[in-house]
Structure formats: structure tokens, C-alpha cells
């Protein structure tokens, strides 16, 4: 796999460029935390498990890269045996060291190795997935993790449009991108439904059976803004390298599909006492030497409220492969991974932190705000003194208010002072939820939902002051 398109990462934040000091011995040693070790393979152990091409063969016609795990405990056991018989290099702990200035930032070698070692249908799919990325995604994307693929748009493009073009929509993969033919696609609805049934895409698109639904909805990954936690409190959090997201782990699209509730009705409804729905993805997820299909769930009450869609169209076109073609679940108002309510959020996308700004008493600021659970940003406030005094962004400077999507905003923030200025944004939603003040307040082990007020430091040069004007003129 070609590794890095080296590029100056316009992430706006750069990690410390210092090595780790190891003081456990008599002498202090410096460690390069990015060193990635080698796999110590044990071919004999793999052979003893059996023929991987047979064990993990293509499950279904037209489904490239898909291995079904959940109905086959013996396959899971075989994969587990392989994974535990090989010695994989430890994770490079990027949280303790510099975040590399490459694009992709992190290669995800271990995930790739796991796929290769399990083999069979999983051998080729990491390479195929990267080929799809290059085909379907905007060339300026910040690739945070090459495999599984994770990326966000560069800051200048995040709020460029209220509806995010597909090629700029965030991607958060936990595994490969399976390549599935539309004609060969179907899924089974079983478990606690009264009459288990299988559905093809044609069935779902048949408007005489199911009414079609169109929704504008924002998807936000719960890893959003994790980089602020990583840079401020390195090493405090899950050491498994996770995508070091900035403020672009969010995207808004028009989704077309149908309400999942209608499909359940077509199966005669749920049996008494059923409370949750589980969705099985076609991608393989690795956790602690075990394999599984990517699996998530939502409450029946959420489905019952018609807030869970099965979608096949994104912004007027078939879903891109990278966004779970040919059919995906869209859970309105929940975090991308769908397991909790969203949090009231906002971020400044222009200027960037550490940027010098020449201005005439006002700093032109741009950004977005979002709240989950069907709530919307009611007002957005900006501060130029670290969060002491606040200005309310004019209503006419906010994009339209909608139930399931973000609002973008622009504001000329009054600022007379010069030198380093801390600009802060915070959002209030229609239930009067707001954001905690400091990054640390929203710390948690997985570094999820960093919903604190977004803070940037800029260097202000106020040209309306004669002295500064004279100085700047001199430069010219
Ligand atoms: N099959 C599958 N579905 C998935 C995921 C995944 O890895 N595999 N990631 C989830 C997470 S954590 C997020 S944030 C969203 C991101 O959707 P997108 O990548 O299409 O923007 O997809 C969710 N659904
Ligand atoms: Mo996510």
C-alpha cells in the first residue's frame, strides 16, 4: 500500500516535536514514540488452523470483502486462534509523541496486518478500500487514519456549504469498505420481529409498499475535536490510536430512503418485550484478538418515532461506496456511532488558531453549531476575551434553523485590542443546553464528544490604530 502523500497538514494544530524521555534506567534515554515494530509471524500456527481461503471465503455473490462472522462461531474461533498465535507490534503511542505532519497522519498498520493475517476474503480489502478513497474523496481531505479509513475536510471547506458535498463528508470507518453489488444486495430482518423476512433494495424502493422519506441531517462523529484532548493532556485516554479528529468530523446531507419502522411493520411488528434493534455491518471489526461484524444498536422508541432511516441516496445520488453503498442506517440526531444523545457543539472554522489577523476593529469569524436529539442551535455567542464577555451572533448571520441539522454562522467580532486574543464560541440550543467552558470538563477515557467551548488564539493587529497602520505600511 503506498503510504504517505506527504503534505503540510493544515490541521491548524501541531503536536510537540519532542521525543519521550525514559528515566527508568541509570541514564535518561530519548525514545522515538512513532517507531513501529515488525510482525513476528508464525506460519506453522496459521497452517494448523486450516486453509484461510476456504475458512474465510467470499460469503455471498457480489459481496467483496465481506465475511459473515456472527452466525459462525467456528470461524470466529479460527480467526481468534490466528490472531493470538502471531506477535503484532505494539501500538505506536502517538498521544505521547508528535502527531506526524504526513497525510495520512496515521497509517493504521496493525489493522492492515490483522486483515492480512486472517486472510481469505480480508486479504485484499484494505488496498481496495484505499483505492476507493482516492476515487471518491476530495483531494484536499485530511486523512487521519489510512486504514480503517478516517478523514475530515480541511478547515476552510468544513462550513463552505450548508449541505456538505459527498466528497467532503466526514468518513469514520471501523473496518474495510466492502464492495457490494446493488443487484446482489439484501438483508434479513429477524430476531424479535413476528415474521422474519428478507428485503432487497427493490423491495425497499417500491413506493407502493413503503413511503419514501427525505431528510436533511447532520452526522457528527463522537470523536469530534478529540485532538484538543490529545494535545492538552497527552497520554490520558485510550491508547489505541484513534483518529485524532479536529472540528471537521461532521457533515450534513440530504438522505433519501424510508423509515425503518415501516419495514418492521412489514414483518408483523416486534414481539412483546422487544426493546432494541441491532444493525450488523458488512465490515469486519477487530477487538482484543476477536473478530466481529461492526455492530450497533438503537432503542425501539427511536425507531418508533420514525427517526431511524434506511437510506440509499445521499444528496441526490446513490450512496458513495465509502458511505455504505448500497444501503445505510441514518439515525437522526444521534452521534455517528449512534449510542447516545448528541451534545450541544460549536466550532470556529475561520480564523485558525495561531493565525495573525490584520483587522479594522472587527474580526470576521466563521463556524458551525449543532445540537443533537432533534434540538437546534438557538443562539450562538462569541467572546474575544477568553469567555468573559459574550456577543450574540445576529440571527440573520445563521443558516436556516432545522430540526436535524447544524447551523453555519458568520460574525464580525468587535476587537480593539492587539496581541494574542483568545476567541471562544459557544452555542445554546432550544432547550437551553450549552457547552462546558474547558476541554478538561468533557474528558473521558475514549476521548469522545469533546463538547466544551471551542477556543482559538489569534494574533490581532488592529489597523484602525494609527500606530499599527504606520507599522504595517512600513512593512509593505
Ligand atoms: N458499517 C459501518 N457503519 C458505521 C461505521 C462503521 O465503521 N461501519 N461507523 C459509524 C460511525 S462511528 C460514524 S461517525 C458514522 C460515520 O458515517 P460516514 O463515515 O458515512 O460519514 O458511521 C457509523 N456507521
Ligand atoms: Mo463515530
Image (tube, grey):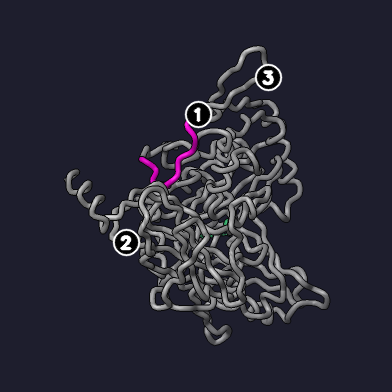
For the residues carrying marks 3 and 2, which lies nearer the camera in this image? 2
Q: Is 116 located above or below residue 257 in the figure?
A: above
The magenta span reads: 8-18
Mark 1 secondary-structure assignment? loop
Name the chief secondary structure element in magenta.
loop
Residue in the picture at 66% in, 12% down: 26
Residue at far bottom of view:
208
Q: Secondary structure at mark 3?
A: loop
Q: Secondary structure at mark 2?
A: loop
Identified at 72% across, 74% down, the residue is: 300
Residue 361 numbered mark, or none? 2
> Is residue 203 among what the camera can see?
no
Q: Which residue is mark 1?
A: 18
Which residue is situated farthest in the front direction here? 467
Q: Mark 3 and mark 1 in contact (Cβ < 8 Å)?
A: no
Direction from residue 158 to residue 195 in the image, left or right: right
Circle 2 crowding by C-alpha within 10 Å: few under 14, some 14–19, many from 20: some
Q: Earlier in the sequence, mark 1 or mark 2?
A: 1
Alpha carbons under labels 1 and 3: distance apart: 18 Å
Q: Which residue is mark 3?
A: 24
- Which image quarter has ligand 1? bottom right
Q: Disc 1 to disc 2, how far (Cα)?
A: 38 Å
Classify residue 349 by image quadrant. Answer: bottom left
Q: Earlier along the polypeptide chain: callout 1 or callout 3?
A: 1
Q: Nearer the viewer, residue 422 or 72?
A: 422
Q: Which mark is residue 356?
A: none
Report crowding for label 3: few under 14, some 14 to 19, many 20 or more residues within 10 A (C-alpha): few
Give the residue drawn at x 54%, y 49%. Answer: 176
> Residue 160, how many percent across, how many down?
36, 64
Residue 177 lies in the magenta-colored region: no
Q: Is mark 3 within 8 Å of ligand 2?
A: no
- Between disc 3 and disc 2, whose residue precedes? 3
Amino acid at each position: 500500500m503506498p503510504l504517505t502523500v506527504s503534505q503540510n497538514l493544515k490541521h491548524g494544530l501541531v503536536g510537540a516535536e519532542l521525543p519521550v524521555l525514559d528515566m527508568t534506567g541509570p541514564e535518561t534515554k530519548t525514545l522515538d514514540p512513532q517507531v513501529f515494530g515488525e510482525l513476528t509471524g508464525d506460519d506453522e500456527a496459521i497452517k494448523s488452523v486450516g486453509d484461510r481461503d476456504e475458512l474465510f471465503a467470499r460469503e455471498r455473490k457480489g459481496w467483496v470483502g465481506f465475511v459473515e462472522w456472527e452466525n459462525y462461531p467456528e470461524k470466529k474461533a479460527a480467526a481468534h486462534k490466528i490472531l493470538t498465535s502471531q506477535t503484532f507490534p505494539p501500538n505506536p503511542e502517538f498521544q505521547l509523541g508528535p502527531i506526524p505532519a504526513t497525510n495520512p497522519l496515521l497509517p493504521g498498520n496493525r489493522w492492515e496486518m490483522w486483515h492480512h493475517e486472517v486472510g481469505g476474503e480480508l486479504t485484499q480489502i484494505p488496498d481496495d478500500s484505499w483505492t476507493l478513497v482516492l476515487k471518491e474523496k476530495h483531494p484536499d481531505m485530511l486523512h487521519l487514519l489510512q486504514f480503517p479509513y478516517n478523514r475530515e475536510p480541511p478547515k476552510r471547506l468544513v462550513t463552505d456549504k450548508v449541505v456538505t458535498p459527498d466528497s467532503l463528508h466526514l468518513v469514520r470507518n471501523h473496518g474495510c469498505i466492502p464492495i457490494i453489488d446493488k443487484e446482489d444486495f439484501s438483508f434479513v430482518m429477524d430476531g424479535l420481529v413476528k415474521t422474519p423476512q428478507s428485503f432487497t433494495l427493490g423491495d425497499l424502493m417500491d413506493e407502493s409498499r413503503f413511503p419514501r422519506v427525505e431528510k436533511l441531517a447532520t452526522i457528527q462523529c463522537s470523536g469530534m475535536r478529540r485532538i484538543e484532548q490529545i494535545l492538552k493532556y497527552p497520554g490520558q485516554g485510550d491508547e489505541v490510536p484513534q483518529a485524532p479528529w479536529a472540528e471537521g468530523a461532521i457533515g450534513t446531507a440530504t438522505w433519501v430512503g424510508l423509515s425503518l419502522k415501516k419495514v418492521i411493520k412489514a414483518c408483523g411488528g416486534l414481539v412483546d418485550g422487544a426493546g432494541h434493534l441491532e444493525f450488523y455491518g458488512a465490515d469486519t471489526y477487530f477487538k482484543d484478538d476477536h473478530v466481529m461484524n461492526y455492530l450497533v444498536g438503537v432503542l425501539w422508541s427511536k425507531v418508533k418515532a420514525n427517526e431511524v432511516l434506511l437510506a440509499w441516496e445521499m444528496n441526490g445520488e446513490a450512496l458513495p461506496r465509502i458511505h455504505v453503498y448500497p444501503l445505510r442506517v441514518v439515525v437522526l440526531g444521534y452521534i455517528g456511532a449512534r449510542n447516545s444523545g448528541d451534545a450541544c457543539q460549536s466550532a470556529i472554522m475561520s480564523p485558525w488558531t495561531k493565525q495573525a489577523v490584520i483587522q479594522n476593529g472587527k474580526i470576521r469569524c466563521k463556524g458551525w453549531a449543532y445540537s443533537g436529539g432533534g434540538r437546534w442551535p438557538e443562539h450562538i455567542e462569541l467572546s474575544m476575551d477568553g469567555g468573559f464577555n459574550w456577543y450574540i451572533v445576529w440571527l440573520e448571520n445563521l443558516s436556516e434553523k432545522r430540526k436535524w441539522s447544524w447551523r453555519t454562522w458568520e460574525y464580525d467580532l468587535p476587537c480593539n485590542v492587539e496581541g494574542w486574543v483568545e476567541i471562544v464560541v459557544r452555542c445554546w440550543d432550544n432547550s437551553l443546553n450549552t457547552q462546558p467552558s474547558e476541554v478538561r470538563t468533557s474528558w473521558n477515557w475514549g476521548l469522545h464528544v469533546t463538547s466544551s467551548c471551542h477556543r482559538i488564539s489569534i494574533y490581532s493587529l488592529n489597523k484602525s490604530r494609527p500606530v499599527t497602520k504606520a507599522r504595517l505600511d512600513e512593512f509593505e
